[in-house]
Image (cartoon, coloured by chain):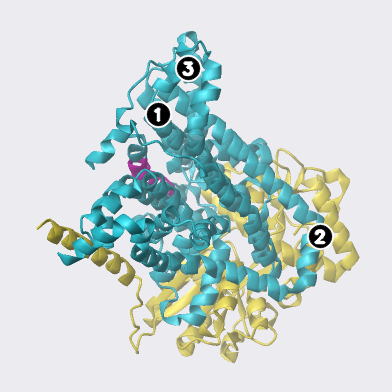
Amino acid sequence: MTSAASASDGSSRRGAAASAPASRWLVALALIPTALIALPVIYVLMRSWGAGWQAIWSELARPRTLRLLGNTVTLCLSVTFFASLIGYAAAWFTERTDLRGKWLWRVLCCLPLAMPAFVASFAWKSLGPSFQGMPGAILILSMESFPLIFLPVAASLRSMDPGMEEVSRSLGKGPGTTFWKVTLPRTLPALGGGALLVAAHMLSEFGALALLRVQTFTTAIFQQYELQFDNASAAVLSALLMLLCLPVAFGEMWLRRGVRFSKVGRNTARRGSPARLGRAQPLVMLGFIAVAIVSLGVPFGRLGYWLVKGVSAGRGLDALGPALFGSLSLALPGTVVTTLIALPLVLLVLRSRGFFARFADRLPYVVHGLPGLVVALALVYLSIRLLPAIYQTRAVLFAAYAILFLPLAQSAIRASAELVPRELEEVARTLGRSPLQAFVSVTLPSLAPGLGAALALVALELMRELTATLILAPTGVVTLATEVWSHTNDSAYAAAAPFAALLVLISGIPVYIFTLRTLRPRTDHQAL
Amino acid sequence: MYDVTRRQLMHLGVGAAGAAMLSGLPVPARAEDQTLALYNGQHRPPVEALVAAFTAATGIAVVTRNGNSAQLASQLIEEGANSPADVFWSEESPSLVAIAEKGLLAPLQAETLKQIPAKYAARDGAWIGAGARSRVVVYNKSMIEESALPKTVLDFAGEAWTDKVAFAPNSGAFQQQVVAVSLLKGRDVALAWLKGLRQHGRIYNSDSAAVEAVEGGDIAVALSNNYYWYALEQELGPENMNSALYFIGQGDPGTLITVSGAGVLKTSKKAEAAQRFVAFMVSAEGQAAIVGAIAEYPLRPGVVSPFPLKPFDQLDPAPLTPADLGDAAEALALLREADLA
């Protein structure tokens, strides 16, 4: 055990340098996602460059570009605002009041996660033109994305010591003041993290907006590919979209900056006395019911309607098995790959304040707003030239999945990683463990909740991913999402309904896991 | 002891990750493998019907990659010389013209081209039509009388039609219609028409969305392809339809013949089988399989569609061929100028 002696000898003096070998490993591992993410960026810049300054400038100077910018920003901000409002209110009512039937409302607030936006939008658009256009899109997308706010906020309210609020109340502050001065600031990082995911989603949303007839940068990029085959102006719009993602990417960093997550007393979180709703009780319940009707009732009702009404009901049903298998065989390994690749990025940025660490950590958020189509075409172009042997294999598709959804995994893993005191790993090292052993025995188990949440969240997105799957999946592979698309493309809505229903049902599994992980009291983590 | 367990666990983890990566590795194709790779942008029912008939007749298996025609054309262009595709079947001819202009298509066999009238294929024989459609006007019967519909598609851009006309600038067929207006009436008329539509009409994401909006009573009239209406009629049942088709005729660009079609990739390593596939598409058997599954007109003389289509020889369409309409690049310039793209 000579190594133990030298390690303990060194660590006392060298402090931060003790983890130098681990960092080098981490940097090497973090290069993988960074290189992957760089691919579409290079492709977009290369294509924009190929267009020439003249074309770039004339694209930027068009009044239409300004209009698209206006629409994109309006949609992004409005949906984020309303989703935050609904998500926060729902979390507060289910965690901090004496509302009856809380478990039911919690479940209803998580289920919309399982509903792909294109299924919901399709249902709404068929109800009439008044739900189309910008106001309709804001309503529907807010209702479908508020769980991304509800879950982290509910979890943070739950793990927060109610003692703080009680002290405030005992000092004579009203419930309003207590909320603004005590509760809200402590839930702000959770709210912000969720809000930025919603915002990034809105930048790259296509399917729902196409159905609801709203034009944004992303729909314009898809339109360019419909109209033209050598795509300079799509590249210029994509570059603009990446610029729009910058505030989102750095906004999250800014929100997290300086937040010291209190670890002391985490295990002592207990139930405080809930706020009494009194006569408002039925009113609040009505609110929850209204949200459930909009986000779940209408889409499910519409699926049922087509199943009964459509002549094509049952057509292509024999593809249900292969499509389910296809979905799982792409989404599950894709999820594992994405989550594994995200891990070194998170660990690196928590351990190193260097430029590369911060850059590597932010880059995925910048690319997260790019439409799947652009990422997929970038991978077609590059893989067939550099590595033709892997073209149209799952490897390239998994790379695309990772590029598109890394930030989801990063956010979820970081939520856990931040809670692991680094000193623990250093203690393990002083006890003679190698950096890898120290990581595996100390850090990894504590990351389990975050990894679980990351797996569930990414699986959810991959299950419904359409564009990259169509372009990059091995020829002949079908998934539930591609079948829904195919049948609706033929106006065979009844034929599409079982595939859509199964997609929602299967998505319920990761939603259930994610909900359980997130809303479980923090004290359980140690037992995992 | 504890350490060993950890190590075993780690190996398990590495093994699982390795297996995940391995499942992505390519399986080397057998040398004698004649399976064709078909890139398909056409609606699936006619393609599935044709592939089944082709495989039954020739024993050659076909693997289909489904997608949107324009996106598949973009993909083929990005793939370039390394494309694994053998045949490209497109919903619209402009996507075929675009990849032909990039030199990606091999000439079709003369015997194949002879099977249908020459005006429904590329002039140089790079691609061939498989089925014909007509641009039509779909109207909601309870919102407007057929007699109130205009004698030319140009009228729809007028103020009288404010909020009554649905159109889809993204649709390949609409773009062909724009080129047709420009060719027949002049560029200025086409531009003014588009500007009028933008001002008074309502934009939809696709022809089928526009047709559904008319059927659902959201809007009175849509510019579309005939088969989207038949697809919806099949889904809802003929007795339930609130909308109907209106053919302008009289050589007006409101009634325009467009085709779905196919070509063989120059880089195909199974060129012979690929040529057989395209030849089969225009054979009597192939044409019957296609028009049995989608409301398109057969291009081969003597084949009859089971759908209650308005007879092809009574359409009196605009005097233009799919080849005249080309890759519809002019439409893009016009759409951009009219601020629709």
Quadrant showing the C terminus of chain A: top left
Q: Is residue A252 left or right of residue B187?
A: left
In this view, the residue in front, A430 or A293, is: A430
Q: Which residue is mark 3?
A: A168
Magenta-span inclusion, residue A507: yes
Three-letter amino acid code of the residue under disc 2: Ala
Viewer can see residue B173: yes
At 39% from the left edge and 52% from the top edge, which residue is drawn?
Answer: A459
In the image, residue A281 lies at what x, y percent?
Answer: 46, 13
**On screen, A259 above or below B6?**
above
Which of the two labelled residues, at mark 1 and mark 2, occupies the earlier sequence position? 2
Left or right: residue B244 versus residue A390 is right
**Which residue carries the number 2 mark?**
A61
Q: Amino acid at mark 3?
A: Ser
Mark 1 falls within which chain?
A
Q: In the figure, what tint was chain A given?
A: cyan
SS at mark 1 in the image: loop
- Counting residues from the start of the chain, the first of labels 1 and 3 encountered is 1
Q: Residue at x 62, y 54 (%)?
A: A246
| Numbered circle sitting on residue A160 | 1
Residue A190 image point, x, y percent: 47, 38
Please, what is the dominant secondary structure of the magenta stretch? helix
Lower position in the chain sequence, tag 3 or tag 2: 2
Query: Contact (CB < 8 A) between labels 1 and 3?
Result: no
Binning the other alpha carbons within 10 Å of mark 2 as few (below 14), some (14 to 19) or many (20 upward) gives few
Residue interval drawn in magenta: A499-514
Chain letter behind tag 3: A
> According to the rendering, which colour does chain B have?
yellow
In space, the residues marked 3 and 2 are separated at their CA atoms by 54 Å
Could you tell me which residue is drawn at 45 percent across and 61 percent down? A401
**Three-letter residue code for mark 1:** Met
